[in-house]
Amino acid sequence: MDLEKLVEQGINSLLFTAPVLGPDLERFLEQQGQALRKLAQQAVEEKVTHIYWVGSGNSQINLLSGKYLLDKFSDIPSDCFTSYEFVWSNPKRLSEKSWVFLASFSGATEDTVVALRHARAKNAKTIVLVNKADSLMGKEADVVFAYESKALYILPLAAAYLFALELARLQGNTEVEPIIRDLDKVPNLLKRQYLEEKEPAKNLAEQFKKETIFYTLGSGVLYGLAYKFGLTVFMENMRVHGSFMNAVEFRHGPAEMLDRAKPSFVILQGNDESRMVVARVIDLLRSQEVPLIVYDMAKYPDIHPLLAPFALMIPLQWFAVYSAFMRGITDLDERVLMGRGIMGKGNGITWP
Ligand SMILES: O=P(O)(O)OC[C@H]1O[C@](O)(CO)[C@@H](O)[C@@H]1O
């Protein structure tokens, strides 16, 4: 089938969020931004002792930014867990003075429902970010943010950013103000990128369509986005082998594999503190002549460096969409194992 026809059909798929990211983020910030800021105020007033961020896959790694920003700018301790790890680790500090944010698009993912019930059993306050308020998790949580969109990575990411930055601002941190201001510029950037990044991504996908292994590397503020594409999108939706690695860890072992084979690499390079070390990894990979794609935040000097996960999302997604089509995947939402009741168990559970 004609590639452009597939793209046209793909616009309605759940995976391909790029067409709605700009408008949906704009709406989300407009409609729910105030409530998120109020929640941050409440956290400060109530002297919350610990904030947990919990989810699975995309719906965990977007929340990691909440911990990253709280650690960097606030004095509230915070941890981010995959849902089952949260339950198994059963942190001793988890109490009625803790707040637990949980994200889930379906609101019915086995792991995260179990985590929500665990947090409730410990009397922690539970705040869920779900697509629909009437989902299983929406009905059981104390506070619900229903984002009403397929943008399951970007909208909870924005919620985590706004909550954490506002909390730090209320604690007197002035460094966060430019980041909060630039967050408002992101919807327009995403609208523009949806149009501008299509052709370059198509060419890149063409160039890489024979590659069978993709390692995706990112560090610092881009750790989460690299994890998202390396661990979920490329493997889950392009169905290629590969994995995610923290870019700073590459010199500590993985580099040696290049002696035997030269798999392809996708590197996300931020404008934050991680930039120079990641640049050294890029130089090393270039010297070894591996197939390499670099997504560089330097292309967006008008956006605060800490907003990189928003700025690099659409170029990567366009690449994944074209790559999937070029590999014979015509339905971007089709799964071979996930969502079929094979891997998720429990009453009302729908995923994975
Ligand atoms: O957001 P939910 O519904 O909890 O689902 C999480 C799942 O969705 C994905 O993010 C995308 O399918 C997976 O990585 C993960 O298994």
Image (cartoon, rainbow, N blue to C red):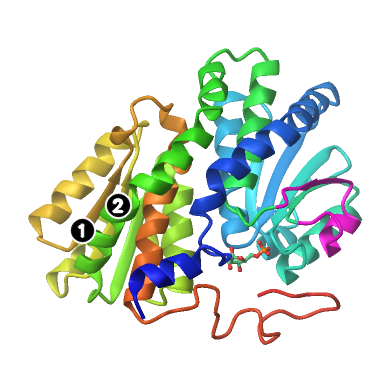
Residue drawn at (84%, 75%), measured in percent from left and top? Answer: 348
**Front in this rendered view, residue 139 or 31:** 31
In this picture, is 278 found above or below 33?
A: below
- Amino acid carrying label 1: it is Leu
- Please state which of residues 124 and 126 is positioned toward the viewer in this rendering: 126
Q: Which mark is residue 292?
A: 1
Measure how far apart labels 2 and 1 are at the Cα level.
8 Å
Picture quadrant where residue 47 is located? top right
Going from the N terminus, do you reach mark 2 or mark 1 first? 2
Tag of residue 22: none
Q: Amino acid at mark 2?
A: Ile
- What kind of element bears circle 2? strand
Instruction: Mark 2: give few (<14), some (14-19) or many (20+) Cα within 10 Å.
Output: many
User: Can residue 77 be seen by looking at this rendering?
Assistant: no
Residue 95 locus on image (x, y percent): 85, 44
In which quarter of the view is residue 72 placed? top right
Percent of width and height locating residue 197: 34, 49
Judge whether residue 24 is colored magenta: no
Describe the element under mark 1 as helix, strand or loop.
strand
The correct choice, above or below, for 262 with respect to 314 in the image is: below
Q: On residue 267, which mark appears?
A: 2
- Magenta segment, which residues? 132-148
Image quarter for ligand 1: bottom right
**Are the residues tagged 2 and 1 within 8 Å (C-beta)?**
yes
- The residue that appears at 48% across and 72% down in the rendered structure is 236
